[in-house]
Every structure is written in structure tokens, then in C-alpha cells.
Image (cartoon, rainbow, N blue to C red):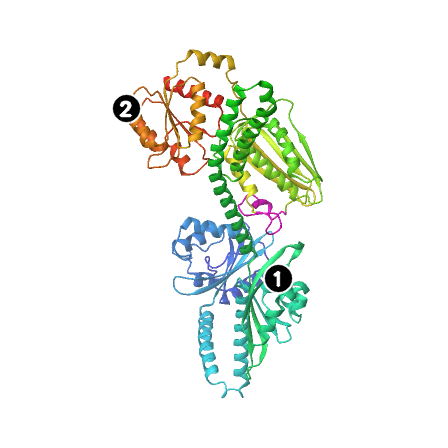
Amino acid sequence: MPPRNPFAHPAPATGNSPEELRRYDLLLAGLDLLDQAIAVFDATPKLVTWNKAMVRLLDFPESLVRVGTPFEAFVRFNAERGEYGEGNLEKQVAERMASVRAFEPHYVERVRPNGKVLAIRGVPIPNLGFVSLWTDITEQRRYETLIQQQNVLLEARVRERTAELLSAKTEIDHIAQALGRSEARLLMIIDSIPALIAYVDVNRKYQFANKGYAEWFGLTKESIVGRSIEAVFGEEAYAGITDYLDTATRGERVSYEYARKADKGRTVYARSVVVPEFDSDQKVVGFFVLSIDITEQRASEAALVQAQKMEAVGQLTGGLAHDFNNLLTIVMGNLEAAKERCDPALAADYLNPALHAAQRGAELIRRLLTFSRRQTLEPSAVEVGQLVRDMTQLLSRSLTESVRIQTHLPDVPLYAMADPHQLESALLNLAINARDAMPGGGELSIRVHERHIPSSLAMLIELPVGDYVQIEVSDTGTGIAPELLPRVFEPFVTTKPFGRGSGLGLSMVYGFVRQSGGNIRVRSTIGKGSSVTFVLPRTDPPAPVADEAREKSHDTDAPRPPVLLVEDEPEVRKIIRMQLTELGYPVLETDNGAAAQDMVRQIPDIGLLISDTVMPGAIGGKELVQFAREIRPDLPVLLITGYASGNAIHEVQELDVPVLRKPFDRKLLERTLAQLLQDSDA
């Protein structure tokens, strides 16, 4: 027997019988005769045995192919000589070692740099290691490529010479196979495109439908074939498209939209085009149907219309607010003046209710502006428990009688830093959502309590560590579908029936809470109800306002500088002049910005400028403030406005000038001017 090559195979274990050694040598000799390269690795993984084809086929150096060589050494050798293509060497090694350590069967093909194509198969040996097989399939792949090229040429010849080859059964078989493959590819493409495609015969029975079409009706491709259009659509939906199908039967192409009830009563919409098919005699034999699901488009259109309505309401409300605020300023000013000049009993019976109604009108304007999102966010210390108590009556009127309201409020006042009007709007939104989720009645619960956010939770809920006021609004309604729950804060996403909700309510609440420095979450269980929980930063109670005696003392002691009042509305100017006079301020007045500029320039005794924000002419409140700061930088300025939003408000906000919103009473005007003069002196 020739001497054993130490680099070809591992030596058998000592102590084996001659017969076992002979069988072992026969096994190795048989492996060496294989064209395939084979290697066995243990679980470490390290090389255990191999055949000569491994060295020949993979071009490994004999010094590397030894018993105990780690599998990683072979991988690294291949990576270093570019077997795996360009890329990070360590990453290539790590990826292949991770795959090997998984001990799972695998098959890959790799093109070597020398152009040879290797098929690599790995088979695990349970609890022991794995076997790797390498097969040179270069010729096989070349033949396959050649065959594919020949098939293409053959198919071309078949198309050209079909009549001549009808008698050749073998060639017909090739054509049938090619057509089968083509049909399979076509069906796959038709099933993959985002369209609903079907074919209906002249008897209005389905002969074909792609996957999307069948699934849109809750069926499979196989089960829809043979059914009539009426059976698939349902009587109601079918009645709506019968006229269009009659037109298509007469040979005309038709297009239409329709709606049908899907699972769980959800309404879905589609747009269809029906194209008739004609035979050689120009007789209609069937119809091709192309449909598109437009449910989301309809929802987007409805949401857009709703948003446009909201925008129109906002624009209308913002414009009306200016006129109403001016009117309320006149009404409230005259009522206050009349109240001070008439008998107290008469004032209590007639003037106080009228004044109270005017104040409620001003509050109503603010609420309308909040609803239309035209009110600037004005955070302050809000006693949340009291706000909820005050809103309970409003909520009871907004909800149906079958909805019971339960409140769980703290015993001690809890103050949150938030815009009170926006908070009211948020609670009203949530209450209306709860009402709509309980069409048969139920219970609406509002809970308020304090909440501390520790450091362990702060990062998770994206809030700073600190104290918060937690508000929870719960209902016993139908709940929110699990697939919709993660998207409830997205604009235009709604849980309400199609066309009944804008999908903006919860997104507005979310925006308000996040803008206020809090966070919000929604929990829901189908059939049991939903719970919306949000937290707002807790704050200290507001500082007490100075008492009336102190204000009167300030009134009598402090000198009143002359005021230049600029207001284009005569009646509003009259009321403000009267209030200023009663407060002890000498008043100069004008109705336009140009005259006011001349007076500021020519009358140095003017100690305070009060101007409307928007006035006729080229010089409005902004221009007048800029002019006054150039001529008299130390002159205190107060702007008044009946607008709630828009360019006028945004422009004056950039000037860092206090703005007093109409309507206002004499006390608010007095406090504002006192603070303005105090800040000016400081």
C-alpha cells in the first residue's frame, strides 16, 4: 500500500483492527474519487476530514488543509483573496461564521474570481458538527444559459413557423411549456399590481379575478369563479350598477363608482371601468373589469372638506370677532358708566344682568376662537378641579341624557400650567368622542389627581422629572380597534363612521397637551370602552391680586401722565376716553395714525400712547409704535385690538409691546396701565 499523504486525510485512530483500517482507507479512496469537494467539521467548528477535491476545487494551500484547522481560517483565507467580492473583510468573516454557528442546513451558489460557479451545501450533524459539499456547476450553468438562449430563439421560431410545426409533437410541448410559464408570470404580475382586475362573461358570471379583486369582496380567486355579479356584490350594490352593465352589454365602455358594505358594516368605495370584449362577429362575449379601491381617497376628501369648513369657520369667526369685540367694548363701557350713575337698586335689576350678558358674550367669542383654533395659546395657572366642575353643566347639555357623567376630583386644589380655554376645548372634544362611542348610553368618567414622574419613567414617556396634574377621561363605549389604536393621534384618522368625523379632534388634543409640556396616551378594549389619560405640568397657585384699597391708594397718589388715544372707531374711542378720564388720565385723541405721528412729534408732554392695532390708511399700530420708539424711545406704549389672530397680531407680537384685547372693562384697563407705567419706571 502506498504511503499516506499527511496533507490529504487525517490518520485513523490507533487501536483499530486491520479490517477497520482497510475499510477506512477504502472510504477515503472513494471520497477522493468524487468530483465534489467534501469536508467534515466538528462542533467547534474545526476540520475533521476531507477529500482531495477540496484542495483541487477550492485552491486551498495544502498547509492550510489539516486536521483541526478552524473553519474561520478557511473563511478568512477566501475573504483575503477576494472570493466574497469587495467589502469589509472582518464583516464578511463575521457574517459567515455567524451563519455556520447557527448549524442550519443551507445552500448557496458563488461565482469565484476565476469564473467558476460553485454550489455550496451545508448539512448539520446533530450535536457533532456539519458536512460541507462543494460542487463545480460551471458547465451546468453554462448549459442552462445556453438552453435559455436556445429557448428564446426556439420560441421566436415557433411564433414564426407555427403552421409548419403543428405536426411536431415535441415542438408543441415546448410551446405549451413556454405558454404555461408566461401565463404563470402574467398571473403573478396581475396579482401583484395594486388594482382589482376581473373578467365576466356575457351572462355576468365571473370567469377570472385577480387576488386583489377577490379579497376586496372577502373571497378567494378560486371561490369567486362561477359566481354571478349579483351574488358577489349583494342585491343593494348590484342594483346600483345594473344600468352601467346594461350599457356595457350594448358594446359601450363604461366607468362608474359604487359603495358596498364590507366586514363589520364598514362602507368601502371603488371606481370601476368595464370594457366589453367582442368576437369576430363584433358580438359582446364578456367584459374586462378594472377597479380601484378609493375608500381612503373618499376619506381624505371628506377630511379635506371638513378641514376647509373648519378653516372657513375660523376665518369667519376671526373676522366677526373684531366687530363683536368693538361692539361689546361699547356696550360694556356704557353699561358700566350707567351703573355708576344710576340708583343701585335699578342697576341691580336692569344693568347688572345686561353687563353680565355682555361679559358672557365676550367669553363666548373667546370660546368660538378657541374652537376654530384662532386663539393664541395663553398658559396660566389653572385650578383643574374647579374647571372640570364648571364644565360639568356644559358637558351635560352637550351629551345625551343616556350618558351619565361621573367626576372624581381632588379635595385640595391642583393647579396646572395650561391655557384654560384650550383645556376646556380638549375636555369637550374628549367628551363628545365618548358620547359618539356610546350610542346606546353609558358612563363618562373624569378623574383628576396629582402625579409625580420619577427619573425611571421620565425618558420612557418623554417628560422631565417633576410633578404633574393627571386628567383621565374614560367611557364605557364600543372601544377602538387594535389596528387603529396606534394611529388615533394622526390627523384625519377617525374611529367614527365615514363622513361623521374630521379625524382632527384627538390630534388637536394631542397638539395642545404636547405644546403645554405634557403627554397623552389612549387605552381601549373592544366592547368595554376607552380611556384617554394626559398630564400637564403642575404649578403653584397664582399670586393674589392687589386689593381694591391698595389700588385706590395708588389712584390718588400716583400722577397721571397725559395719554394720546388713537382709535378709528368713534364710539369705541369715546368709551376708552371716558374710562381713562375716570381713572384720572388727561386724554388727547385722534382717529388715524398720521395725525398721531404729528402729535407725538409736536407734544412732548404726552406720557403714554394707547393705539388700536389696525386702522385705515398706511399707518397702523405697528408703524406708529416703530415711529414712537424712534422719536421717544422711553414713551410707554399700549396696543389694543379686537382681532384674535392674523397678520396684525403676529406683527405686533414681534414689537414686544403689551396688547390689551377688546372688550375690556375699566378695572382691567387700570391694572394694565399701572403695570405698564411700573415697568416703564423700572
Neighbours of disc 1 within 10 Å: few (<14), some (14-19), many (20+):
some
Question: Which part of the image, by quadrant, shows the C terminus?
Answer: top left
Residue lying at 59% horizontally and 75% vertically, measured from the top left: 249
Q: What is the x, y in percent for residue 27?
A: 55, 63
Q: Is residue 492 magenta?
A: yes
Majority SS type along the magenta span:
loop
Secondary structure category for the residue under label 2: helix
Q: Position of residue 63 (x, y in %)?
A: 42, 55
What number of labels is visible?
2
Residue 225 is situated, as x and y percent measured from the top left of the image, at 64, 70
Q: Are marks 1 and 2 in contact (CB under 8 Å)?
A: no
Q: Residues within 10 Å of mark 2 (few under 14, many from 20)?
A: few
- Dot 1 or dot 2: first in sequence order is 1
Q: Looking at the image, is 253 positioned above or below residue 134? A: below
Q: Nearer the viewer, residue 465 or 245?
A: 245
- Is 596 inside the magenta-drawn segment? no
Q: Secondary structure at mark 1?
A: helix
**Residue 48 visible to the viewer:** yes
For the residues marked 1 and 2, what is the alpha-carbon distance in whole angstroms?
82 Å
Residue type indicated by callout 2: Gln
Label 1: which residue?
Answer: 215
- Residue drawn at x 63%, y 29% is 389
Span highlighted in magenta in the image: 481-501
Q: Name the amino acid, label 1.
A: Glu
Closer to the camera in the image, 78 or 612: 612
Residue 45 in view of the camera = no
Q: Nearer the viewer, residue 566 or 281?
A: 566
Left or right of 329? Residue 104 is right
Q: Residue under label 2, please give it.
A: 602
